[in-house]
Amino acid sequence: MTENIRNERIEKSERKNKSEKSEKSQKSHKKDISKKNEENKFIIPEQMKSPNILNENLPPFENNTDFIILMQRIKQTILNKDLDWTYHLAVINYLRRLLKFEKDIFNQILFGLKLYPKIIELINSFRSILAKNALILVNEIFSEYIPEFDEKKNKTPIIIFIKAIIPTLILKANSNQSFIKSEANLCLESLIINMKYGDTLITLIQAMNSKKNQEIESAYNLANKLCDNLSKEYLGEPVLFNDLMKAIGSIYELKKDIYVKKIINLIIKIKDKITQNDFFAKLEKCGKKERELIKKALDTKINNKPKLKNSTSTEFQNFLKKSKDKIKDKNNKIRKSTTTVNLVKNKNEISAKKK
């Protein structure tokens, strides 16, 4: 009996010691995490946490700035989702400063450290102030001259960034929030004016494959404007021309009325710009599938026929309505004439009986 009591006491004390140790370890772990978070935090001037700072008001960096540490801090902060949102706003402002005063370091951060997907995440943030300021940064990126090719003739990361961000910008350009819509449209305007690359045009054409009519319309209008800004020599470069025909062919192949007319207009614009003979000579060097699709798209005999089956176009709906109205009018006339004949017949029968 005495031994049992002693064993119980020993077990209780052991359990108590274990719980105390685990509590201590948890507290020390929390302290370590909080210390790391403190280390990762910027010591940020309040000005850098301000939204909507004008480009001309962005302050230059001090002469003693350690840009290696700054790059590390920016990366740590933007990847840390647990920080207060004002820190992410500050990162956007720091990136804007780097773009303005230290472009090489900015390129290393955004492209070398591959932080551009985080910029796209911030554009999609539920905090509209973060989304707006991220769009301001993107507009400033597109307002700078960044070459399409480097010295080794390899595509620079700006092309990867353009391809990744265009669908998001088109989505935001049709947003219900007017200030987000306005900033996104400014980004797209800068894109068309300054990022005059074949990959930009191809990505805009690919963006036409959307379920929303507004987004299709936006992508088409942008592709149309960019096509006007590109020279015929550039459009006619073999590799670009082949990639363009693939992109255009894939949209035409969808066979939806909303795409077909727009994509045919775009092909005609490119054909007229390059000149017809050169266009078809270059087309012959493309893949078989692309050749067939583009020739089919340019065949007026095929594309001018009214599409009566599975068509959702307004023209078809109007045609259908008129046809229904005509049938309805015809049936009404038949009914009226039948009623008139029956009335006359009944009158004759009644008069005959009276006689």
Image (spheres, grey):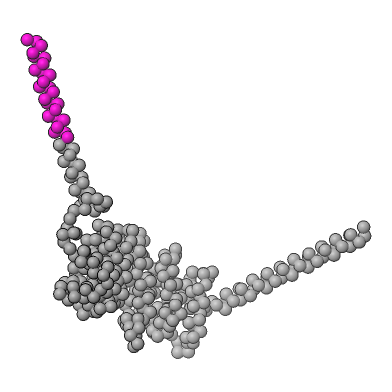
x then y, percent, for residue 101: 39, 84
Queried whether the magenta region covers residue 39, the answer comes back as no
State yes or no: residue 335 in magenta: yes
Q: Main secondary structure of the magenta part?
A: helix
Residue in the foreground of this view, choosing between 119 and 286: 286
Note whether 79 is above or below 352 in the view shown.
below
Quarter residue 118 falls in? bottom left
Residue under the point 24% across and 79% down: 237
Query: Looking at the image, is 270 positioned above or below residue 317?
Result: below
Where is residue 160? Give x, y as percent: 37, 76
Q: Looking at the image, which residue is at 13% across and 23% down?
A: 342
From this viewpoint, is residue 343 visible? yes
Question: For this view, does 232 lie left or right of residue 201?
Answer: left
Q: Is residue 309 above or below residue 23?
A: above
The furthest residue to the front:
288
> Which one is in front, 309 or 141?
309
**Apparent side of residue 4 relative to residue 184 in the rendered image (left or right):** right
Q: Which residues are magenta?
A: 331-355
The location of residue 252, given as percent across then percent down, is 26, 63
In front: 291, or 35?
Answer: 291
Quadrant for the N terminus in the image: bottom right
Q: Quadrant of residue 227?
A: bottom left
